Amino acid sequence: MKTGIGVFVAAFAALGASWAGFVLAPSLQLGGTKVTTVLNSTDEYPVQRPGEAALGLQVYRANGCAACHTQQVQQDGTAFEVVLTGAGKDPVTVSNLAAGLKLTGLTKEAADAAAKTIADAGGKTETHLSGTGADISRGWGSRHSVAVDFLYDAPVQPGSLRAGPDLTNIGARAADANWQLVHLYAPKAIVKDSTMPSFAYLFEVRAATGSAEALKLPAGFAAPAGFEVVPTPAARHLAAYLLSLHADAPLYEAPYSQLAKP
Amino acid sequence: MNPIDNKSPAACSSEIDASLRVPLLALFGGAALWLVVGLVLGLLAGLKFHAPDLLGACPLMTYGRLAPAANDAVLYGFAIPAALGVILWIMSRLSGMPVALPIVPVVAANIWNVGVLVGIAGILIGESTGYPWLEFPRAAAVLLFAAFLLIAVSAAATFGWRRQRELFPAHWFLFAALLWFPWTYSSANLFLTAVHVPRGMVQAVIDWWFANNLLFVWLGLAGVGIAFYFLPKIGGRPLASSGYALFGFLTLMFFGSWVGIPVGAPVPAWLPTVSTVAAMLSIPPVIAIAIVSLRTACGAKVVCFGGPFCFLRFGLLSFFLGSMLYLITGCPRFGHLVQFTWYSVGQTQLTLLGFFVMVVLGGIYEILSKTSGLELPFPKLAKAHCYLAMLGVLLYAVPLVIGGVEQGIRLQNPAVPFADANAAALLWLRISSTGQILLILGSLLLALNIFVMTIKWKIALGKSLFAAVTAPLPVTEVKA
C-alpha cells in the first residue's frame, strides 16, 4: 500500500467482488424467480394480491409496520408421522400394535419401519411430513418461508424484529376483516397487554349513520353514544393486505402434507 | 509510519486549519443539530414501549416512522457528514496542503443537510422506501449522493496535490471509505428505488448487502481510519505495527463486505452460508485492529479526563465489542436464537453510537478549536459530554443485547406465550431509555459548544468587517 493507486485497486477489487456476489448474482438467480405450483397440485403459487391488498402493502410500508413484525417463518427440520387409516381384517391386533408404536416425530426410516410393521399385520397407514420448530409450534405457519412467497411484493418487507408476532399467515389466523380493523383501531380491545400502538388516525369518528362499515367495538372501546368509528380507505386497504397474508402452501422446496381432518 | 508531521512548517498547519474553517463549521454545525434530533426521535420511539398510545393520534409520531427516522438522523445526519469533515481535515494535514476547492465542501454540506431534511420529513409523512437503512425517498438519496461526491472530490484533490508523498495507514482506510459509500449507496438506490425494482427477495438481499457494507465495513473503515490518525497524534507515538494494520485493512474489505445475509433468511441457502463463512473470516481483522489500537493507546502517556483521547479509546473498545457481537450472529445456532430480537438493535447502536459517533466526536473536539482559531467556549461541558456519552451508550446498547438474548431464548420455546417473551424485553427497554436521555444531554452540550463558537466567530468576523469599513481611507485613495 505504497501508492494511492494500490489502495484504490485493492478497495475496488474487494467491493467489486462483493457487489458481483451479493447484488449481481442474486439478481440473475433470484430475479428470474417464476411462479411455481403447489405441491401435488396444478394450482399456481403465489397469486397476485387483490387490488385493495396491493394498495394495503403501501400502507404497511408507509407506517413502518415491518419495524416490529416479521414475515418469515423459521423451521428447524421436518418430522414424519404415521397415521393409521385402515385396520384390515384383525382390528384389535392392529390397533393394539399401533398403540404400542411411536408414530409421531419420526425420521423417514423410522416412519417406514413403523408403516411396514403395521402393514405386515394387515393395517393400512399414511405417512405425513410436517415441519418442526418454535414458529411452527406457535401456529405461525406450517413451513418455513421461501423466496417465492415474496414474488409479487415491492418493497419486500421481511422484517428483522419481533416486537409483535410474525404476520406471514395472519390472514389465515384471523380471517375476519372486522377483527383486523378493530385490532388496528384499538389493539388492547383484543389483546389486553398489547404493546402495539393504536392506529386510530386511520379511522374516522363521525356522527352515527348506521353505516355497515362501522366497527363493531367491544364495550369500553366503543365511540361515544351517537357516534361511530369507520375505517378510512387506508385502513380498509391495510386490513385487506393483512387478510391476504397467507403464505402457507406446500411447495417443492418447502414440503409438508396436510393431515385429513378426521 | 508516524503521521506527526515534522517537516512542514508551523505556519502551514495554521494555514490548513484556516482553509477548513468554513467547511468544517458548516458540516459540524448541521451534524450536531441532527444528532440531537435523531436521539430525541429515538427516545420518543423507545417511549412507545412504555406507553404505546403516547402521541398516538399523530401519524407522524407512530413507532414505525419514528424508529427509522431516528436511526437515519443519527447515521446520515450526524455520523457521515461529521466524519467527512474530520476526514477532510486529516487529508489536508497529511497532505501538508490547505484543502483543495474549499467552497465545494461548503456547498456540499448545505446540499447534504437539505437531503437529510427531505429524507427525515419523507419518512415521517410516510414516504419511506420501506428498506431498512435505505428509507430516505429518492429525492433525498440523490442529494446525499451528490453531496458525498463533492466532498470526496475535494478530499481526493487535496490528496492528489499533497506535498508529503508517503502514505499512512489512516490514508488507506479513509481512501477506501471515500470509494465505498458512493458505490454502495448509488448501487442500492439504483436497484431499489429505480423504475424497475427487481423481483421479490432480491430486494432484501441487496438491502442486506448495503446495510452490512454501510454499518460494518464503511463505519469500520472510516472510524478506524480516523482513530488511526488521532491515536498516534494525540498519544505522541507512532502507530504500533503497521503490518497488522495492513492485514486488518485488506481482510476487513475483502471478507467484511460479504457478511450480512441473516441465517435462515428465505433466500437460496448459498447466500447465508457465504455470509457465515465471511463473518468467521472477518474476526481476524477485528482482532488485528484491536491489537494495533491497544498497543498504540496503552503506551501513550496521555492523561485525559474526558478529552478526545477518552472518546477514541471508548470508541475503539466499542468497535471491538460491537463487531464481535455482529460477527458471532453468523454462527447458525446463535444467529437463529437472536435473529428477530432486540439483540441486533443493541449491537447496531453499540457500533453506531458507541464506536463511530464516539470516534468522530473525539476528532471534532480535537480539531474544533484549531480550525476555528477560537477556544472551545465551554471546555468543561466537552468533558461532561464524554462521560455522559460513555454512560449513555452503555445503558442504551448493553441492556438491549442482554434483553435480546433473553427474548430469543423465550421465543425459541413454544411453551412460552408470545406476550411473555415480549414482556421480558420491556424491563431492558426501560433501562435503555435512560441511556437515551443521557445521550441527548451529551449531544446538547456538543451543539451548545459548536453554536456558541460559531456565533463568536461570526461576531469576530463582523467586527473585523466593521473595522475595515470604518477605517479611515488612506490619503492616497482619497486623492484618487
Image (cartoon, grey):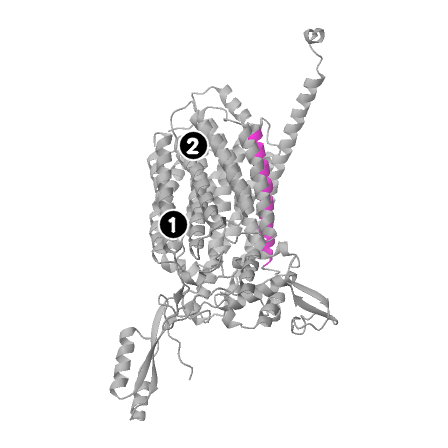
Label 2: which residue?
Answer: B232
Q: Is residue B442 visible?
A: no
Quarter assignment of residue A130: bottom left
Coordinates of residue A192 in the picture (x, y in percent):
59, 70
Question: Is there any visible trace of residue B461 in the rendered image?
Answer: yes
In which quarter of the view is residue B58 placed? bottom right
B62 and B204: which is toward the camera: B204
Q: Position of residue B349 (x, y in %)?
A: 50, 49
Q: Amino acid at mark 2?
A: Pro
Q: What's the magenta region? A: B22-48
From the viewer's perspective, is residue B419 above or below residue A21? below
Say which of B314 and A160 sits in front: A160
- Residue A22 image label: 1
> Looking at the magenta stretch, what is its main secondary structure?
helix
User: Foreground residue, B303 or B119?
Assistant: B119
Q: How far apart are the alpha carbons under marks 2 and 1?
A: 37 Å
